[in-house]
Image (spheres, rainbow, N blue to C red):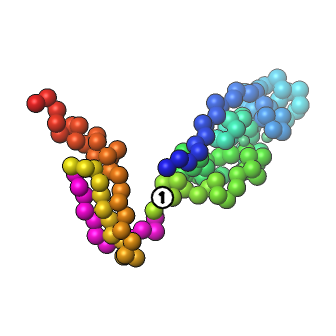
Amino acid sequence: MDVQREEAPQWQESDSCQNCKQPFFWNLKQMWDTKSLGLRQHHCRKCGKAICGKCSTKCTTYPVMGFEFQVRVCNDCFDTIKDEDRTSLATFHEGKHNIAHMNLDNARGLMVTCGSDRIVKIWDMTPVIGCSMATGFSSR
Ligand SMILES: [Zn+2]
Ligand SMILES: [Zn+2]
């Protein structure tokens, strides 16, 4: 599979929301200056910005970065995430292939599966078997 993966961003540090500029609760000076109450800091998992709760009301999965579960993103990023970005990569490959019979050829690292739809597939299992075989043949 060559699915494009994205690096998760570094979380940015800020004393105020990088979106609406409201101060966070430890930013006493700005709270005093703006006569506003400090807010809790959150981070957007997509762009890494330090944001307040109001600016990050949305949660989404983002499997491209490895987030198969719901994570917080800022409202701006939420708008940029398309439906196909949310498709889980974990269930992405061959989910529809119902296996009726299977046979594993250990020596060659090949697996043959026969689906209920009578489609026969040959799988290269060497990356999977490779590691378990390596432990089996230790120090002889
Ligand atoms: Zn904000
Ligand atoms: Zn963001």
Residue 8: in magenta span: no
Across and down, in percent, residue 7 comes to: 60, 36
Q: Quadrant of ligand 2?
A: top right
Tell whether 77 sits left or right of 34.
left
State which quadrant residue 99 falls in: bottom left
Q: Which residue is mark 1?
A: 93
Across and down, in percent, residue 122 comes to: 35, 60
Q: Amino acid at mark 1?
A: His
Across and down, in percent, residue 35 comes to: 88, 32
Can residue 103 be spotted in the picture?
yes
> Residue placed farthest to the left in the image?
140
Camera-side residue of 8 and 26:
8
> Residue placed farthest to the right in the image?
34
Q: Residue at x 16, y 32 (%)?
A: 138
Judge whether 85 appears above or below 41 on screen.
below
Tell whether 1 sits left or right of 6.
left
Judge whether 111 appears above or below 38 on screen.
below
Can residue 22 be spotted in the picture?
no
Residue 99: in magenta span: yes
Q: Indicate if the residue with disc 1 has its beta carbon within 8 Å of ligand 2.
A: no
Camera-side residue of 40 and 113:
113
Q: Residue at x 31, y 72 (%)?
A: 100
Where is the C terminus found, in terms of image quarters? top left
Judge whether 116 appears above or below 67 on screen.
below
Q: Magenta region: which residues?
A: 95-106
Q: Residue at x 74, y 46 (%)?
A: 77
